[in-house]
């Protein structure tokens, strides 16, 4: 549900755009692959890290708009396991950008009711980053307006593998019967278990792939791809993605006639999208 606008930090132009949305069909969970930082920097003949710094600055506005329209969870693909293979100096600088971002943003998150969470192989992060991340999560734990969920050192395949390993251990221990291993069981063992699956996945920079991101969770998500590079992605662009989402019919394997043409269907079913 959209919040009252009296205390909104957003411009009137953005609030007018928000007013055009259907408040009953706002996605509960939006996932974003923030792609194009390096290409943005290259376009302006800047160091790649300038692109990453600019990309980090974009996040605050997207969170503000998401909170305004009633998005419950915003999951950002911030650093993949594959990113560890980048040049060591770039990786080290990225970790410091993350650390600096957290220190800078925690007071703002507290003021806005944003709760910070994280998924991925957090123990693979440098110790100082782990410490800052744990501090940031603790400091924002009371936030109830929106969850900002950072995917850090994240791999969708590794997440599913870890879930399978945990389930196998429970079966071996006799605390779980093989016939009880179903889709809800697997979902409960994923790191995203506390949240609904994403309704919408946005990818910037025009690439048409999931890049090992939320492979289980995105099974029925609507996909929105834009050629805009992440540092250029504006709050207006985010609202365009939400409007595109609201214009789609989500069938979850059923026919349009079965759901009465309802674009707001929210429960996935079995079978082909048809």
Image: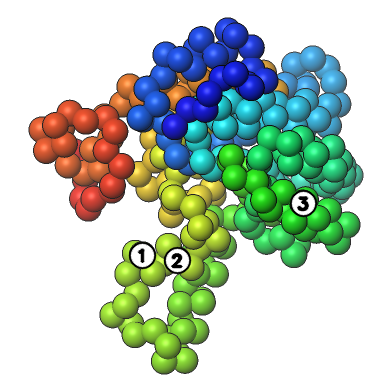
Which residue is denoted by mark 2 in the rendering?
188
Name the secondary structure under disc 2: helix
Work out which quarter of the rendered image holds the C terminus and state it: top left
Residue 223 seen by the camera: no
Tag count: 3
Name the secondary structure under disc 3: helix
Say which of 259 and 36 sits in front: 259
Q: Are marks 1 and 2 in contact (CB under 8 Å)?
A: yes
Q: Residue at x 48, y 27 (%)?
A: 2
Residue 269 seen by the camera: yes
Image location (x, y in percent) of residue 173: 47, 91
Q: Residue at x 75, y 62 (%)?
A: 124
Q: Going from the N terminus, do you reach mark 1 or mark 3 first?
A: 3
Count residues near mark 3 (Cα–Cα under 10 Å), then give few for <14, some for 14-19, many for 20+.
some
Indicate the quadrant where residue 58 lies. Answer: top right
Image location (x, y in percent) of residue 157: 52, 59
Q: Going from the N terminus, do you reach mark 3 or mark 2 first?
A: 3
Badge nearest the viewer, 3 or 2? 3
Label 3 and label 2: CA atoms lie apart by 26 Å
Q: Residue at x 21, y 30 (%)?
A: 262
Which residue is denoted by mark 1 in the rendering?
184
Q: Residue at x 59, y 45 (%)?
A: 144
Res 37 label = none
- Residue 122 located left or right of residue 270: right
Which residue is situated farthest in the top direction here? 13
Label 1 and label 3: CA atoms lie apart by 31 Å
Colour scheme employed for the rendering of this structure: rainbow
- Residue 119 located left or right of residue 226: right
Name the secondary structure under disc 1: helix
Which residue is situated farthest in the left direction here? 257
Which residue is denoted by mark 3 in the rendering?
139
């Amino acid at each position: 549900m959209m919040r009252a606008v009296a205390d909104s930090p957003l411009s009137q132009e953005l609030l007018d755009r928000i007013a055009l949305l259907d408040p009953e069909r706002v996605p509960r969970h939006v996932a974003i692959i923030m792609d194009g930082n390096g290409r943005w920097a290259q376009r302006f003949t800047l160091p790649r890290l300038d692109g990453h710094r600019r990309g980090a600055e974009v996040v605050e506005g997207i969170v503000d708009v998401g909170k305004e329209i009633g998005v419950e969870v915003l999951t950002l693909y911030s650093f993949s396991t594959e990113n560890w293979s980048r040049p060591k100096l770039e990786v080290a600088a990225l970790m410091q950008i993350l650390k600096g971002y957290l220190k800078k943003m925690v007071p703002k998150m507290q003021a806005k009711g944003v709760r910070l969470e994280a998924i991925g192989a957090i123990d693979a992060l440098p110790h100082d980053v782990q410490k800052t991340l744990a501090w940031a999560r603790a400091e924002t734990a009371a936030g109830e307006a929106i969850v900002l969920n950072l995917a850090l050192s994240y791999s969708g395949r590794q997440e599913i593998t870890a879930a399978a390993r945990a389930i196998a251990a429970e079966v071996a221990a006799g605390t779980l019967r093989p016939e009880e291993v179903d889709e809800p069981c697997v979902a409960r063992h994923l790191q995203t278990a506390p949240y609904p699956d994403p309704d919408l996945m946005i990818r910037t920079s025009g690439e048409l792939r999931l890049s090992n991101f939320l492979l289980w969770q995105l099974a029925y998500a609507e996909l929105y791809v834009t050629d805009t590079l992440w540092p250029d992605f504006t709050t207006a662009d985010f609202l365009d993605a939400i409007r595109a989402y609201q214009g789609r019919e989500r069938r979850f394997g059923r026919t349009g006639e079965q759901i009465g043409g309802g674009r707001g269907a929210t429960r996935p079913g079995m079978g082909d999208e048809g």
